[in-house]
Image: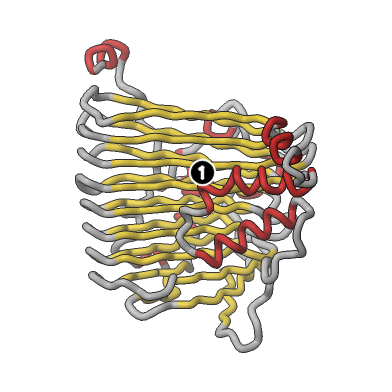
């Protein structure tokens, strides 16, 4: 395999830069933007004066710390992320406020770190940096709500032997736009799990990337989305294997209900010549619940060494399995309940891996609400109560 690749030429490097001007104007002729509804996000392609107001709330257990900072002053700024598109580069250049989340070395906070961000008005740039000390173990929940319009970067620097479980919840109001890049640098023998949950907003484009800082790193990227009429949910993953004996496991599932519902999933995994012993697999499944809905799925593998443990990918898009429905109905289950059970089963293997029981329940309740099978999930768009410690940020 190596000789064949050399004869054909090595794969082109993924272009990255901190300078927004190094990126051309996004166009549907560009691979990175060809599925994106550019007319709906055009005003994010040039610098703007941030006027966004975002209400913030944090729950921070012992062993972790959260500070509001100018991210460019941090030593770790840019350690995990070099932008791969113009919007991310603009956010990096113009974000003057962001959160610095740290977890002490060897710490194991008893509860998740929870960051709730509720958009009030305007547009924002944000850039957050998360640092997890060596041999620490933590869960971080980032909950996006309200009328949010943001270009955002979030970096995760995970120390050797550490474990970080990140859950990003995107449940914003209609009309919201989230263009976010999540970048992780995974240390030697460290573990990183990133779960992206998207249920709300008009355009949500998430770009997760993973790099490894030493051998033995493990990354798991999970995704669940339920798109309705007028919603465009897009995920573009890139996992860069350049260290030996590392693993990556990707599983994304999308359901679409509505004639104009749209999801896009791009999964790019590169295994470089130095990444011997790599094991990787990526899976995308899409369930179409109505006519007119469209799901695009593009898995890619670039393998530059034959000395790997395994690599593969799978993708499928389809409608309800009539045989499953018939089986359930033949056992006395009404059709509506049978459909609900099929959808629950479709998402179950991803949801059960989130690792935060309250979020797992909230997610399944929200999905059933969308299907018309349950009352509105309590607190889905709940504003923080009066007795919560809130701060208002103009970003």
Name the residue rendered at 56%, 49% in the picture. 348
Q: Which residue is mark 1?
A: 86
Q: Assign the N terminus to one quadrant of the image.
A: top left
Where is residue 255? Give x, y as percent: 66, 42
Name the residue rendered at 73%, 34% in the picture. 326
Q: Assign the C terminus to one quadrant of the image.
A: bottom right
Most extreme residue toward the front is 331
Q: Residues within 10 Å of mark 1 (few under 14, many from 20)?
A: many
Question: Residue 349 versus residue 86: which sits nearer the camera?
Answer: 349
Res. 201 in view? yes
Q: Is residue 356 above or below residue 229?
A: below
Question: Residue 58 versus residue 197: which sits nearer the camera?
Answer: 197
Where is residue 102? Give x, y as percent: 34, 70
Query: Based on the displayed image, in which of its 4 quarters is residue 119 positioned?
Result: bottom right
Left or right: 383 in relation to 129: right
Where is residue 132? Give x, y as percent: 31, 64
Query: Based on the displayed image, in which of its 4 quarters is residue 295 positioned?
Result: top right
Left or right: 141 in relation to 291: left
Q: Is residue 20 above or below residue 60?
A: above
Left or right: 179 in relation to 267: right
Q: Secondary structure at mark 1?
A: helix
Question: Residue 322 versus residue 306: which sits nearer the camera?
Answer: 322
């Amino acid at each position: 395999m190596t000789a064949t690749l050399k004869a054909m030429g090595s794969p082109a490097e993924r272009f990255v830069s901190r300078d927004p001007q190094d990126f051309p104007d996004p166009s549907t002729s560009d691979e990175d933007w060809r599925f994106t509804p550019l007319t709906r996000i055009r005003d994010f392609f040039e610098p703007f004066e941030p006027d966004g107001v975002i209400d913030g709330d944090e729950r921070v257990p012992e062993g972790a710390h959260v500070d509001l900072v100018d991210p460019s002053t941090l030593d770790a700024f840019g350690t995990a992320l070099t932008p791969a598109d113009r919007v991310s580069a603009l956010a990096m250049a113009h974000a003057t406020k962001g959160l610095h989340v740290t977890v002490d070395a060897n710490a194991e906070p008893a509860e998740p770190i929870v960051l709730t961000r509720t958009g009030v008005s305007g547009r924002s740039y944000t850039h957050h940096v998360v640092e997890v000390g060596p041999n620490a173990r933590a869960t971080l929940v980032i909950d996006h709500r309200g009328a949010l319009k943001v270009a955002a970067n979030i970096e995760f620097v995970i120390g050797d032997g550490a474990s970080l479980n990140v859950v990003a919840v995107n449940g914003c109001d209609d009309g919201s736009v989230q263009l976010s890049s999540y970048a992780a640098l995974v240390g030697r023998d460290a573990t990183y799990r990133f779960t992206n949950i998207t249920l709300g907003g008009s355009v949500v484009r998430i770009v997760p990337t993973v790099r490894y800082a030493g051998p033995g790193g493990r990354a798991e990227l999970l995704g669940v989305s339920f798109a309705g009429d007028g919603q465009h949910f897009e995920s573009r993953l890139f996992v860069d294997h350049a260290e030996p004996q590392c693993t990556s496991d990707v599983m994304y599932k999308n359901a679409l209900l509505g004639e104009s519902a749209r999801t896009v999933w791009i999964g790019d995994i590169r295994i470089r010549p130095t990444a011997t012993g790599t094991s990787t697999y990526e899976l995308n499944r899409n369930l179409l619940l109505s006519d007119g809905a469209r799901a695009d799925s593009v898995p890619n593998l670039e393998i530059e060494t034959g000395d790997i443990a395994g690599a593969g990918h799978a993708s499928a898009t389809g409608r309800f399995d009539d045989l499953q429905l018939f089986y359930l109905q033949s056992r006395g289950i009404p059709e509506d309940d049978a459909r609900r059970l099929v959808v629950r089963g479709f998402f179950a293997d991803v949801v059960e891996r989130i690792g935060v029981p309250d979020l797992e329940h909230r997610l399944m309740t929200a999905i059933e609400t969308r299907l018309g099978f349950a009352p509105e999930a309590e607190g889905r768009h709940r504003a923080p109560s009066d007795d919560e410690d809130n701060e208002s940020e103009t970003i």
